[in-house]
Every structure is written in structure tokens, then in C-alpha cells.
């Protein structure tokens, strides 16, 4: 069931931790019934965790994190048709 984002009562101003966000994304993929999306998300998390672990430069870490967000967006939009994300005011550049 879709959530109506135009109603203020359906939105939260709280920001979830990274762990809770990952759990929700994986839960959403599992609920959606797409085992390939679930697998793709796990692979994306693993790929970018490794890149972030090896990187010591703070600017590069931020850039790597943004690339990870873009890959998650692409994986989710290609499997679900979802076309936009609320980034809580942060920039999100999508390169097609």
C-alpha cells in the first residue's frame, strides 16, 4: 500500500540511523517480493562498505557515499519503477 507523502501526518522529520535505514530497505525489498533486489542491495552495501573502509580522505568518503546512494536508487527504480526519493534536503544527482 503506497504512503501518501502529501499528508504531513504520514511523514517523519526524524532521520534513521544507517543500520535502521538498511534494515528498512532490505525489509521493503523482501516485502515487495523481489529476491533479486534484496540481493542487489546486499551487494551494493558490501561494495561501498569496502570502499569506505579503505578510504581515509573525508571528501572522498562523502563522494563514495553519494555514489552508493545513486546505486541504491538505480537498483530500486529499475526493479520497482520508483522514480524519486526524498533526500531530506540533501542533493541527489541522478545520471541516466
Image (cartoon, rainbow, N blue to C red):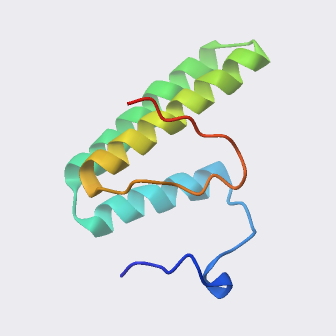
Whether 84 is drawn above or below 70: the answer is below
Q: Provide residue 22's location: percent of width, then percent of height.
A: 52, 52
**Along the line of sight, the residue nearer the viewer: 79 or 49:** 79
State the residue at coordinates (70%, 45%): 90
Q: Is residue 50 left or right of residue 11?
A: left
Q: In this view, does 15 lie to the left or right of 37?
A: right
Image quarter in which the C terminus is found: top left
Whether 61 is drawn above or below 84: the answer is above
Whether 21 is drawn above or below 7: the answer is above
Image quarter in which the N terminus is found: bottom left
State the residue at coordinates (64%, 76%): 11
Q: Provide residue 48's location: percent of width, then percent of height.
A: 51, 27
Q: Provide residue 50's location: percent of width, then percent of height.
A: 52, 22
**Along the line of sight, the residue nearer the viewer: 44 or 95:** 95
- Count every numbered label the image shows and give the total: 0
Q: Provide residue 44's location: percent of width, then percent of height.
A: 41, 34
Q: Is residue 88 left or right of residue 58?
A: left
State the residue at coordinates (64%, 23%): 63
Amino acid at each position: 500500500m503506497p504512503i501518501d507523502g502529501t499528508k504531513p501526518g504520514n511523514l517523519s522529520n526524524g532521520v534513521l540511523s544507517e543500520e535502521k535505514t538498511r534494515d528498512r530497505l532490505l525489509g521493503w525489498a523482501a516485502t515487495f517480493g523481489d529476491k533479486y533486489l534484496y540481493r542487489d542491495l546486499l551487494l551494493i552495501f558490501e561494495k561501498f562498505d569496502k570502499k569506505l573502509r579503505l578510504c581515509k580522505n573525508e571528501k572522498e568518503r562523502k563522494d563514495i557515499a553519494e555514489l552508493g546512494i545513486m546505486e541504491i536508487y538505480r537498483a530500486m527504480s529499475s526493479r520497482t519503477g520508483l522514480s524519486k526519493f526524498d533526500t531530506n534536503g540533501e542533493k541527489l544527482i541522478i545520471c541516466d
